[in-house]
Image (cartoon, rainbow, N blue to C red):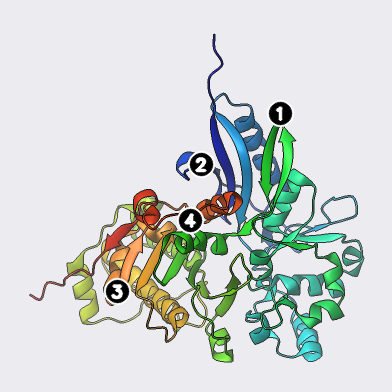
Amino acid sequence: MSTPIKQDVIAIFDIGKTNKKIFLFDTNYNEVYKEYTTLEEIVDEDGFPTEDIHALQKWIQLVFKNILDSNTYTITAVNFSTYGASLVHLDKNGDLLTPLYNYLKPIPSDILEQFNNTYGDIYTETGSPQSGMLNSGMQLYWLKYKQPDVFKNIMYSLHLPQYLSYMFTGVPLSEFTSIGCHTSLWDYGKKDYHSWVYKEDIDQILPPIVSTETCISKYYNGKRIKIGVGIHDSSSALIPYLKGSKKPFVLVSTGTWSVSLNPYSEIPLTNEDLQNDTINYMKVNGKPVKSAKLLLGKEYIHQITQLSQYFDVPLDRHKSVTFNSQIFNRLSYSFSPCFKWKYLVNTETPEKTNLKHDNYQDAYHQLMIELIDVQLQSIKTTLGTNSSIKRLYIDGGFSDNEVFIKLLTHRLSKLKVRSTSSSLGSALGAAIVILDGKLDSKFLKKNYGLKKHVPFVLNKT
């Protein structure tokens, strides 16, 4: 019996806060396999919920081994796309020193005050509003002064994408997109670590910086496999659009976070920008990407959970709601906010949620109208005064939410709104990076499931 011919594939581990996925792409970037899981959170030494890094390791190793041993696929390359603002601290033996601290964990006020008194306002220089653990550089400062015994034993601190790469290669590295994602580490004007990083000797535990396209070859089962150094997910989500679109655009990458990214703005961030939660991400070439982030997905999950309890309907009821222009018209006629936000900051909100609806469908439309108002402000902040941008791309979890897309298209009627039919964005970007892929202008339309949306017409009667 002849040996079956196995298909060459690129394996991408796409690690979100909620879903952990592996995608297999062929050499033309077509998805040929997908698998995902969710993992139970654990708590750190303070009782704060966080990712179970050991469970994540085991899942990645098991999935990788199963595909290696399969009779269907031959893995030629592996890369990693993950959420940012998360550091893994290793001792001299390569062992974990701490939990993978949650980026929502608060930093003690005395530490923030000490930092600000010492270094002043560095936040416009680093493109990072003061955001506690979301500034992963501040996690290192916190460790140095609150857990000095731990800090002195750190050999390397790796951002999560680079740690996953390290699991496969044993080579500790840093790369631009993870350094540049609201870490407070990078001085965008100097194109180097900020001076405070050197003054605190934190640069000593940050591995050498390499290009995002860097690969390290390893042999598995006698086969040579290219291992990428990993990439921050929001920066990765930009890559297929930058490669495949000839015209300027803003990308709204949705999930737990909704991040609006403008890769065409070259104006440095202002204090007003930072107050509006505008930040810099970084392209693979080290150039800034003006961005605004919202915990839109997390807020959405919280609110639909509340709605399901209030109306005594199944939690997944929201999935079956389709857009109804008559409901929208009626709600808009005498509109007033009803929802008290839990995770969205810098937004006006009632003192408590006060629903005035007698059915789930109306309440859901009300929720989405209010969420779109917040999302719209984020997009407009990212756009700035750049009138040359006429296109808006939407990918990720909300790209298949009909109510979200209809409302956003209606409110942004002067832009050409496009969405993808699947949430491949960050995974596909990681695949393109590791193969240094070249895409033609038809790629987004033909291979990426791009959908065109036009504003709906209201019934005037």
What residue sits right under mark 1 in the picture? 221
**Is 298 left, or right, of 82 in this rendering?**
left
What residue sits right under mark 2 in the picture? 27
Q: Earlier in the sequence, mark 2 or mark 1?
A: 2
What residue sits right under mark 4 in the picture? 425
Q: Quadrant of the C terminus?
A: bottom left
Graded by Cα atoms within 10 Å as few (under 14), some (14 to 19) or many (20 or more), the crowding at tag 3 reads: few
- Can residue 314 be spotted in the picture? no
What residue sits right under mark 3 in the picture? 356
Q: Earlier in the sequence, mark 4 or mark 1?
A: 1
Residues marked 3 and 2 touching at CB (< 8 Å): no
Label 4 – label 1 distance at C-alpha: 30 Å
* Above or below 355: residue 275: below
Residue found at x 83% / y 72%: 202
Amino acid type assigned to the residue bearing label 2 in the image: Thr
Label 4 – label 3 distance at C-alpha: 38 Å
Image spot of residue 137 (x, y percent): 74, 72
